[in-house]
Amino acid sequence: MKPHIDSKRSFSVLSAIFGTAGRSVAPSDGIVGGDPQRAAGPPGSRSPGPRRGSHRGVLGVAAALVAGALVAGACGAAPEDAPLEENVDSFSAAATCETCEPPDDPPPVCTPSCTGKSCGASNGCGGKCANGSCPAGTTCGGGGVYAQCGCTPQCSGKSCGAPDGCGGICTSGSCPYGQACGTAGVPGQCSTLPIGQGVECFVFNDGYTNMAGPSQAVYLTDTGQACIPDGTPGGTCRKWFGRCRTTDPSHTPVLFSVFNAGKVDMVGPSDAVYSRSTRQACIPDGTSTGACRQLFGVAKLPDGRPVECKLFDDGGAQKTKFTDDEIYVSGWPKACFPNGIGDGFNYGMCRKWFGECMVAGCGDGACNNGETPSTCPSDCKCGDGVCNGNEWCGSCSQDCGSCCGNHVCDNNETCSSCSQDCGACCGNGVCDNNENCESCSKDCGVCPPKTCSGEFAGPQAQNFPVGVEEVYVDVYGQPVYGCLIARPVYFANTLDEAALCGGNAYPYHHIATSGTVGTYVYHTGTANGCASSTFAALSSSAAAACGYMHGYPYEGPCP
């Protein structure tokens, strides 16, 4: 069925639109040239002719309005059997009533009302008042629960255990150095940092800039940088490591010192350490290089308690079971404990990383600092996998191994009780069963002399002189050899063995096996205030480096 169109209504609409009913509409009557801002002249005046396109504009507007009128008429109520007055087949697609349903009325808007109401009261819209009134000392939501009165603890700047303003105490306030809030398991109570408390450090550049961390692991590179792990092969590297602190909430500072072998010439403590490419550790002292020594460590809390570290390789492999407070750099990346255990050309036990530092003392799991099974049985006990303290193969073979088989005839062993160590009983006239000239000269004869490294001297053994040169580092980080400080002679089988003996006797120096010793004179400046000095060196370039490093940059005597 086609929609009913009321032609009279449609016509009246059009008449109203054009301002005329029952008369024709002139193109220029009231609309000139399609410009709504330009009106026709008064009645009787001569109106200008329509501009080109004015009829087209009027007809376009009329067509649109006719279509709207037809749709509006189609949506009007009409008897189903009313006669169809006009054929509107061409408009049937537009004049459908399926899209003419009026929209639903929007739901009424509810405005919450909380004025004068208490916290949590109904807001009249199905919710609760979240900004209502509360008893004194509380606020709406102050306890962390929405629309419920509660108290917000105030502990900023307060000490551990101080009132929090809500009837409780502050459980995260400040404590004296060496103590932390709640460390002993009692909330709001300061207590001494426990034995074994962990330590973490940062890395940074000069002026504590570009700081990264913290981390419980650090390694030192051949370019003199300190690095911490970040998931990449190289890690995050800076010049310094330091600003170390305990890992508990107190973040109590931990300071390091630098010193030479035997803990002599100690300087510090300091919260910043860097490693020079000369394998020295340095702390700031106001100069360009800082105060430098062979080792670093002897870390302490402000209350004087020691902090010690472990060594380990990538992934925590080969981690030492004990801690130490002395660390030195031997090659890169390699940090070492000078504990007398040799590993090639280096002294001590060496790994890539140092870290997992902790507050040391009885109970830290390491038998150190003079602890014994009697003074600290928890650390110095047989069966912990570490042969330390007063343990030895005779008292704890579980940790130290069996005495028989250690290649030393000791601990009351005899040739009859442990031939593996002591050999067959000496005197049988045969040098066998591991006998040698040292263990049984009766059977094996007198031993030949030994070389500087402890080897038996062969027929080619002789005295070899070597040179001991100071080592500096140029601006590119490369080693430069300088002053000749010694010319020792070693009895050895080879020149290389003699050089090894020299390196053992003069660590952190260059051992030269060739070159001619010469004397060189250098001076400090002009004749006015000039000072001269004579240096021994193996080359002119070494002499130049020597003079420069000792404050004598000009060659020759004073002018």
Image (tube, grey):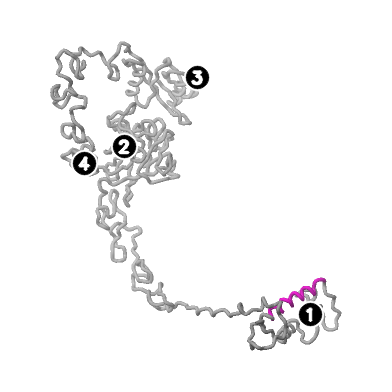
Q: Earlier in the sequence, mark 3 or mark 4?
A: 4
Q: Which mark is residue 113?
A: none
Residue 396 locus on image (x, y percent): 17, 35
Circles 4 and 2: CB distance less than 8 Å? no
Query: Which-is-in-front pick, marks 1 and 4?
Result: 1
Give the main secondary structure of the magenta stretch.
Answer: helix
Is 282 displayed left or right of 392 in the figure?
right
Q: Which residues are magenta?
A: 52-69
Quadrant assignment, res 440: top left
Which residue is depicted at the point 43% across and 18% down? 538
Is 404 displayed left or right of 288 in the figure?
left
Quadrant assignment, res 228: top left
The residue that disc 4 covers is 379
Q: Disc 1 residue type? A: Gly
Tell me the CA gap for discs 2 and 3.
61 Å
Tell me the CA gap for discs 4 and 2.
20 Å
The residue that disc 1 covers is 30
Q: Disc 4 residue type? A: Asp
Query: Which-is-in-front pick, marks 3 and 1?
Result: 1
Query: Which-is-in-front pick, marks 2 and 3?
Result: 2
Q: Disc 2 residue type? A: Gln
